[in-house]
Amino acid sequence: MDYIEPDDPVELNECSERFVVKDVRKNKQSLGNYGGLAINTEESTEEWLKNALSVHFRESLNVDVAGETSPSNQDWSINLKKSYVTTLAAKFSANVVLTVENKDKNFRKLFRGNSVTTNWAGKEHEMLESLNLALQNGLEKLEPEIRDICTL
């Protein structure tokens, strides 16, 4: 899954904080349902989220994938709690739920991104585009928090 580049990527000064992404969903391959059929991916949703953060914040964040590194209590976790697409008549409804957490600072905040797009031909790329737009919407809501974290 490739993240689409936003129209207006975020400019940040270099951020000294470390972020670790993790998919905490029970079924890490599920992308939702289309016409009653389960849609799954073999690709890493953690890599998708890491790539999205890198693109959205113009590579100004230090982002790792949880399984590839040993997170510490000082690290900021960005967790993928939900990521799914459903169909509503001739529309795709995509939702992404993220949390930002830091155990050392006893901090936890939830961000929800969503997107409703027209289902023109029922193709997988339309569904994935809707999911990417939902992630982009979630990252836009997350942006002020990331700015605050990076200025600590």
Image: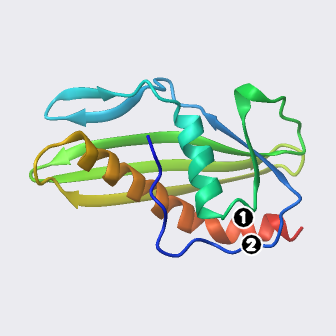
Tag in front: 1 or 2? 2
| Cβ atoms at labels 1 and 2 below 8 Å apart | yes
* Front residue (pair 84, 49): 49
Q: Which residue is mark 1?
A: 146
Q: Which residue is mark 2?
A: 12
Task: Name the residue: 52% across, 35% down.
Answer: 45
Q: Position of residue 8 (x, y in %)?
A: 53, 76
* Front residue (pair 66, 100): 66
What is the quadrant of the C terminus in the image?
bottom right
* Front residue (pair 111, 43): 43
Task: Specify the quadrant of the image occupied by residue 34.
Answer: top left
* Helix, strand or loop status at disc 2: loop
| Vertical placement of residue 129 versus 122, above or below | below
| Vertical placement of residue 19 versus 37, above or below | below
Q: Position of residue 36 (x, y in %)?
A: 16, 29
* Helix, strand or loop status at disc 1: helix
